[in-house]
Image (cartoon, helix red, strand yellow):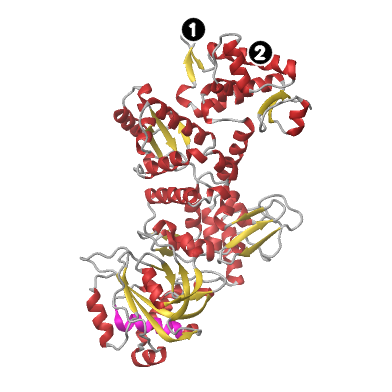
Amino acid sequence: MNDNNIKCMYFNHRFKEKPNDKVGWVQKSLTQADITIENLADALVNGASFKPGVLVGGNKAKNWTQQQLFGLDFDDGIRIEEAYNKVSSLGITPCFMYTTFSHKEEHHKFRMIFCNDTVITDGNIRDRLQATLMGVIGGIDEVCFNRDRLFFGGKGQVVLHPDYEARINAESIIEKYWNKDYEQYISNAKSKSKKKKSTAAFSKSKDKANTDKEYQPYENFNVKAIKEHDVEYLRKVLAHEPIEFENKNEFWDYIYSELDIAELIDIDNPCSFCCVLHDDHNPSANIFTTQNGVQKYRCCSENLTLNIKQLIEMLGNFKSEYKAIQFIMDIYNLSIKESQWSIEQRENIDLMISNITLNKFKELCPQADKNIKNAKDTFLMMLSIARNNVYSEKFSNNDGEIVFFVTHKRLAECLGMNTNQKRIDKVGKYIKMLVYHDLIRILDDSQIPKELLMKAIKYSGTDKRSGNHVNFYAIPSWVIQQLSTIENNGVRWKEKGYRIAGISFDMFYRSEGFDVAASLYPQYKKKKNEDGEIVNRTTTKTSDERTLKISEVILNCIRGKGYCTEKEVVYILGNKYRYVVTETQIKRSLNEIMDSYGLKKVKANKVLKEQYNIDSEGYPNIIIEDVI
């Protein structure tokens, strides 16, 4: 093998900016690579990512197996040439350097990469070498000590001080420069990991907690406390030492990889136990760890696989992801420096955007994803608008979700459309599709914070037909229950045969009743009757007349030849009765007609084509009697 080839964890995607919102994706995408130092250097200056250590069976420090490359992170302002001259004077030569994404001429931020002359497989030697390099050079970001340290690349496109043949020798550097003060780097890294309590200590803390709060005997107290959102009890039982994370990425890595699900739900044998999510008399659940080091809860009888956050969401019946996360932080005594509500909401939306753009939503909700294919750009734009309109927590709804407003016209402009009425109406229909799936929620005036309502009125004016009518929306969090709701709505959309062209209050009212229609059109759910009274909106007299005519034609066709098509209805009404309707109008009434007269819409396969003597190419959709 070429002497310049080294092993490391590597991800070749070339980012243009620091991928703060894609750290999880990068972590999971890293694979063990055998790469030349020249190629690695070129990739890093063009936005690739890597970990110097080789990890097997997961992406955490405990999965470290070997290492030859060592990295130092400089971000305290020292100039590049000054740092290079310093290491050169010590006789420690890097094989290359590169600037990070946040490097600026007025504030240098860069990395040095060193290559040891042999592969190190002893973790203690690795730690002492890393600590020695950091200590003797000074001014290094401490987090680069970790065995699982992830280094992003940069956008500088130029490799600094390339010397690809340069090697260091761990033994000689440690012997020459080691100082007992450098032990702090090693001990600091160890102190960040969770300290396990002994069984005795756990029992003692549990008994103490039970004296403060009475529970019925033979119950799983921890599960009961999660269901009741009893933070005080769980904090005492779990007795977790306080940890403050520098950022949300570190927080999530810790949540998924370090927290013990068995300890949380007080299970002695994680390999087999009765499920805590339902009444289970025979053990059907277990806890396992994935190859990426993430603990998962598995219930075989219900076919459920959950991470610790999703398990807490289900046990605690949380309706808001934000509140579930806050509960986790409270019971484990965790905090984040950037934990303000607005940042939480932005990151929540960023996760949704990532799931959509990376096609992960297709895995989570396959039918819903298929239904909204043409509305995805509208959805992504609404997520972006919501993200940019995070004012403060006082502008949230009761579930802690962002409330924002936008007109159909403004949304069309953001999407780069011509803002004629046809385009504006189409945007409105896409929004109704998204609302139906519960990807977004449209609010009525009673759900809108007054200050936000006043802002919207001032912003938009009152001309509804101009496209400037304001609607208010909220973005529900994608907790596991919500994803199930979205997919169920997607299945129902398909079963009902809904199409964008037919979307209207009338269509949903005729197909599913007032409540569904009103949830999609809250501003129009009331109207004045002939006596001037405010009543629930229903279908119009004109719409009722159209529906009656359409049903008469469909029934006559079925009596005559056994089936009918939507195109036939348009043709017959237009030519025989001189009564103009469109396929769009038919779609609005069709579900009600089929329910009323025991009909169904199917695709004409070979059997049906022969049965009804259908002489046409392909397999058209036909309406026939629903014979049971």
SS for callout 2: helix
The picture places residue 584, in percent across and down from the top left corner, at: 54, 23
81 sits left or right of 301 in the view: left
The picture places residue 270, in percent across and down from the top left corner, at: 66, 64
Specify the quadrant of the image occupied by residue 247: bottom left
Q: Which secondary structure class fits the magenta region best?
A: helix
Q: Residue at 58% across / 72% down in the picture?
A: 198
The answer to if 320 sits in the magenta stretch is no
Q: Earlier in the sequence, mark 2 or mark 1?
A: 1
360 sits left or right of 285 in the view: left
Residue toward you, 199 or 534: 534
Q: Quadrant of the C terminus?
A: top right
Which residue in the structure is indicated by mark 1? 530
Bounds of the magenta segment: 125-138
The picture places residue 425, in percent across and down from the top left corner, at: 43, 27
Query: Quick one: label 1, few (<14), some, or many (20+) residues within 10 Å?
Result: few
Residue 150 visible from this viewpoint: no
Q: Residue at 38% across / 80% down in the picture?
A: 184
Q: Using the image, tell me which numbered label, if any, was put on residue 552.
A: 2
Task: Residue type at mark 1: give it.
Answer: Glu
Task: Residue type at mark 2: give it.
Answer: Glu
